[in-house]
Amino acid sequence: MKRKFFAYTIPSVVSMWLYSFYTMADGFFVARGVGPMALASVNIAMPYINFIFGLSMLCSVGASTVTAIYLGRGETDNASDAFMTSMTSLFAASLLVAVCSFAFTGKLAAFLGATPRLDAGVTEYLSIIACFTPFFVMTYFFEVMSRVDGHPRLAAISVALAGATNIVLDYLFVLVLGWGIKGAAYATGIAQTLPAVMLCAHLKFRGRRLNFRAFTYKLSYVLRGFRLGLGDSVTEFSVGAVIFLFNHRVLDIIGEEGLTSYTVTAYATTLAIMTMCGISQGMMPITSYSHGKRDMDTSRRVLRLALITATACGMSWFLISEIFASGIASIFINAEANPEIHSDTVRAFRIYAASFSLIGINIVLATFFSTVERPLYGIILSSCRGLFVIAASLYAMSGIFGAPGIWLSPTVSEAVCAAIGVTMLTRMYKRGGGHDG
């Protein structure tokens, strides 16, 4: 079981890391090629990217869970119908979001918190990213479906190719051609087309159990997928929501320079969160399949292994952050040119990093609740972590301690949510949860 768990988890984590790296590449090259305020502009736009990725997770995670459950029961026709129904629905939704986002880019930038000093950069970045929205959305869908189809390594390879392409294009467009923020947006968008096309072609021509075929569209598949995927999608939506809330609070208390410090912290946090998402996504096919076979003993063992792995990774990220905080900040901020911003960033990051040790518990539990068809528990936990508890903690801690309270609030929030998640898991086990669906 351990070998199977890590066979799914390691490629999933690598995929998530690579997604994080090529998302962070925009910030790195913009910061180096344009300056700290341009980096702040990219961060203002980040909640939109989290939103479209969360939209993909809303359908993709739930659809993959439904598909895996049907495959576990040997119902291949239902599995194929669920796959095709979810794919067509998600693609249509992504087109609608792209059109609306492009049409109202200015209003979207203002809503996200663009100040007059940052507005031009934010608007330019968003207008380009919006055009590539379908590729952002469908890439993740094909990635998780490839894992369900039994090709976890292929998913990792496709994302690695996209990441390498994004980094090369960022260097070319931003530093060589001098396109600035616009170049970073084009690099990210173009890179997103590669894994989408590659994985789509694989499922079309070489899918083992899932491929494109005539199907019966059933809205019930979509609704069931939404129900099961909502917990995980809230996790991703929460990343954008937290960035949104922090951006506004940092601007209110510290100012635009503080926004640069938070941007660096947010990038590092995204890498830690994606590690935990990779672990939870690696766990998901096994627990979903086991649940479909009514084998809850295996599901519980896999959950225990995922929690141990996530906690160990969280502690590792915390220690790395404390030891190498200055070096991490220097990747984005030139300490000689901007010494005050650099030192403020290091202090903020070291306080913020304490939350890394608890993030994995909450993300893994939220995913597990969905895979054993207890989506309400997952929704509650993800909503608390992504909106209610973090918002209350942010405003309470910053109101009491000022700027240091901003950076401390994630740790307080994660601790409260971990207590909620463990309580719900204990309650579910006492009731014999997960045996019915």
Image (cartoon, helix red, strand yellow):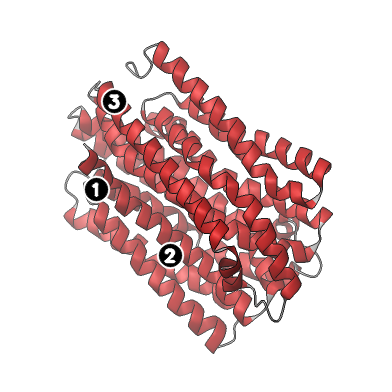
Give the labeled residue for mark 2: 192
Q: Disc 1 residue type?
A: Ala
Q: Disc 2 residue type?
A: Gln
Determine whether the residue tagged by mark 2 lies in a helix, strand or loop: helix
The residue located at (40%, 36%) in the rendering is 307
Residue 27 percent across, percent down from the top left: 58, 69
Residue 100 percent across, percent down from the top left: 61, 55
Residue 240 percent across, percent down from the top left: 61, 50
**Quick check: 145 left or right of 419?**
left
Give the alpha-carbon distance from disc 3 to disc 2, as whole Å.
33 Å
Determine whether the residue tagged by mark 1 lies in a helix, strand or loop: helix
Give the alpha-carbon distance from disc 1 to disc 3, as whole Å.
19 Å
Name the mark on residue 97.
none
Name the mark on residue 7.
1
The residue closer to the viewer here, 108 or 396, is 396
The quarter in which the C terminus is drawn is top left
**1 vs 3, front mark:** 1
The residue closer to the viewer here, 393 or 221, is 393
**Quick check: 328 left or right of 298?**
right
Q: Disc 3 residue type?
A: His
Give the labeled residue for mark 3: 291
User: Upstream in the sequence, badge 1 or badge 3?
Assistant: 1
